[in-house]
Image (cartoon, helix red, strand yellow):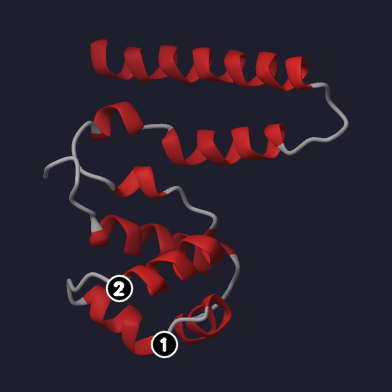
């Protein structure tokens, strides 16, 4: 898969996890995200959604688009959870900017070390 290719099946699996976490069925997920149920069915059959539906699904799920893009997937081992953690930390209005940067930097270092241990034994 090249860097510009979108992994629809991985995205669909991640959406399924979000749906399950929220204790929804696919029809409810479609309604809440603003896409049609047929869009989700077509994705399950391997078709890629159009950009509007993709944007709606990313908005609803809170997933990071980079997680599902082409090459370098080993480097994105922690992208989805890390992105979510970083987003929460960066939106913390009770912490000074330099405090947010320090926390994100610390977590980044931990994630890199864990990733490297998984890849190098």
Q: Residue at x 19, y 40 (%)?
A: 3
Q: Are marks 2 and 1 in contact (CB under 8 Å)?
A: no
Q: Quadrant of the N terminus?
A: top left
Choose the circle earlier in sequence order: 2 or 1: 1
Query: Image quadrant of residue 35?
Result: bottom left
Residue 36 shows which numbered tag?
A: 1
- Element at badge 1? loop
- Element at badge 2? loop
**With 61 as the anchor, is 7 left or right in this view?**
left
Is label 2 or label 1 in front? 2
Image coordinates of residue 49 in percent, x first then y, are: 29, 72
Q: Quadrant of the C terminus?
A: top left
- Specify few, some or many for label 1: CA neighbours under 10 Å numbering under 14, 14-19, or 20 or more: some
**With 4 as the anchor, is 16 left or right in this view?**
right
Image coordinates of residue 24 in percent, x first then y, are: 56, 77
**With 93 as the anchor, is 74 left or right in this view?**
left
How many marks are shown on the rendered structure?
Answer: 2
Q: Residue at x 53, y 75 (%)?
A: 33
Q: Nearer the viewer, residue 33 or 113?
A: 33
- Specify few, some or many for label 2: CA neighbours under 10 Å numbering under 14, 14-19, or 20 or more: few
Residue corresponding to mark 2: 50
Residue 20 shows which numbered tag?
A: none
Q: Residue at x 70, y 32 (%)?
A: 89
**With 68 as the anchor, is 82 left or right in this view?**
right
């Amino acid at each position: 898969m090249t860097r510009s290719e979108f992994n629809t099946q991985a995205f669909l699996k991640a959406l399924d996890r979000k749906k399950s976490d929220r204790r929804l069925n696919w029809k409810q997920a479609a309604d809440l995200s603003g896409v049609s149920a047929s869009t989700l069915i077509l994705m399950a059959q391997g078709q890629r959604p159009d950009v509007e539906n993709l944007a709606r699904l990313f908005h609803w799920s809170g997933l990071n688009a980079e997680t599902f893009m082409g090459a370098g997937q080993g480097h994105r081992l922690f992208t989805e959870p890390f992105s979510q953690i970083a987003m929460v930390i960066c939106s913390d209005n009770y912490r000074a900017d330099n405090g947010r940067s320090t926390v994100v930097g610390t977590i980044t270092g931990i994630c890199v070390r864990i990733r490297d241990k998984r890849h190098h034994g």
